[in-house]
Amino acid sequence: MKRWIAVAVIVTLAGLVSGYVIDAPLAPSADASWRETARFLDGGAAGLVAILGYKGAVAGPLVLGALLCLPVLALPLRLGRHQNASPLPGPVWRPEPLPEEHRIGGSQTADAPMPRPVVLIRKPRQRTRDWFDDLSWLGGLPRLGDTPWPRGRDGTPLPFAAQIDLADIARTCPEVPLPRTGSLAFFLGSGAVVPVPAGNHDFTSPPEDFEHGFFPFWPVEAFAVDVLEQLPGSEGTGAQAISAWLARRYPPRDGPLAAAEPVERIWWHGVIHLADCYRLALHEASRLTGRRKARTSDARENLELLGADPAATPLLLETAQRALDREDARLREHKAQYDALARVSAAMDHFTEEREPWGVLTRDEFAVLRDVLAHVERDCADLVRAYAPKDLPELATFTLRAMISGPPEALAHVGDAELARINAGYRLAGRHQHGMFGNPDRRAEVLLLQLAQDDMMGWDWDGSRLYRFRISPADLAQGRWDRVSLTFESG
């Protein structure tokens, strides 16, 4: 751990030096309290530029920092019980306790043995049944009954992740220390677990101020895994037992789902999504415009102040002029991309107006879409890269996932061969699996739910990280769901 702290310090210092060279001179705009210090630092930056040239002065500290990191990283590891880094904690939710009338009953005892790990596997999609009647699922909307939608500390509604039927879990793993009726609804963000009494509840509509998107609806089935049966004579973990159990039953994933290429058909569902993405990218780009203008204005003001400073050297003036030219060029490029994106967004809004999501584009409409994607890649790719599908295969894959998990009219557009392919090879998550219990890190707390990276759910975070909901045995025995904690950590 100390080694990585040393590396972080070296990299940070190198970055600060390079950053100062880029932004120098700062003395003309500095407060009087540190203007002399800024003059000294500006002189040092100018000296580096004089010796190494501007590019060398920027890159030199970074190269030196990298060289200094090498001997630190080469130090031998100290082996021991703490060799593995501890998980990085995520946001933790601990609101006020629920009123007694809103609780589901607790478990039988606080000192019950840890139950077998339970793996949650997405069910195969079938045309002959309505899977929206299933009792345990990921994504979609919750069924909360009369319980209000939970909110975070800032008052905003939390994104829904999963709802698990407790009777189903009790049948799968009778030793679980959970109630035998009702269900638990799990929310991300700052985290929440909502107990829902048994009953026929409709899907709960989100509050009007709900700003998050919805994950695909996908029912799951639970399987209990016997660790000793899967790993006889071993003290392996629940995760290892689950891996061994899965290896005997399911083919390993060969990567994320991808639509077949070349893409020959596109549905309006994907094009409407693309238009929404461009609109979001344009909104975010407008914020960036303000920041670009502010940086250019600051650079111009620094140059003017420096020009009025008799102590300014020609080298400092040259450095300030170069900084202004750089920021001005960035602003002009940003404006050009912004204007191009604004035209594309307006055209796409008109193009998708009053279209049926599950209609197929004609040949001419398909050609228009190709032209739009090429135009975006050429003229405003920097502004949309983080927000929108970049090509036809990515757009077709998005729509395919929506069809597989969507209503019957969407599923009808998936061919039998494609449906069979997805049911056979894409029911598992990625590197880790969704599940319950199993004590993966040998804590005293009970693991209520684990959610893994899963492209079919739109959960595209780092595959080594997991959302984990935990509760202490004592709180579980009392049904204190308000004391559940949520972390986002390495698996």
Image (tube, rainbow, N blue to C red):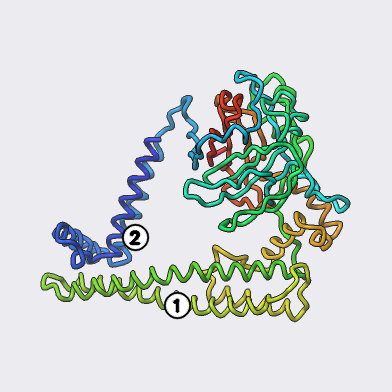
Count of numbered tags: 2
Q: Position of residue 283 (x, y in %)?
A: 51, 69
Using the rendered view, name the quadrant where residue 98 is placed: top right
Going by the image, does 344 lie left or right of 293? right
Residue on which disc 2 sits: 59
Q: Which mark is residue 460?
A: none
Task: Locate residue 467 relative to residue 22 in the image: left or right.
Answer: right
> Which residue position is annotated with label 1?
335
Name the residue type under label 1: Lys
Q: Quadrant of residue 387?
A: bottom right
Q: Is residue 43 above or below residue 199?
A: below
Q: Tell me the residue at 71%/61% (across/down).
A: 397
> Residue pushed farthest left?
310
Of 358 and 292, nearer the camera is 358
Q: Position of residue 386 (x, y in %)?
A: 54, 63
Q: Nearer the viewer, residue 479 or 284?
A: 479
- Image height of 109 relative to 392, above or below: above
Which element carries disc 2, helix, strand or loop?
helix
Give the Cα distance between marks 2 and 1: 28 Å
Instruction: Say few, some or many: other residues with alpha carbon within 10 Å of mark 2 (under 14 / 14 to 19 / 20 or more).
Output: some
Residue at 19% across, 64% down: 27
Q: Is residue 238 visible?
A: no
Residue 2, given in percent of the width and then of the height, sits at 37, 35
Say whether residue 119 is visible. yes
Q: Residue furthest front?
A: 101
Given the image, on which type of amino acid does mark 2 rest? Ala
Q: Position of residue 190 (x, y in %)?
A: 52, 44
Identify the image quadrant of the C terminus.
top right
Q: Earlier in the sequence, mark 2 or mark 1?
A: 2
Q: Residues within 10 Å of mark 1 (few under 14, many from 20)?
A: some
> Is residue 214 found left or right of 246 in the rendered image?
left
Task: Give me the residue at 42% from left, 72% from top.
Answer: 289
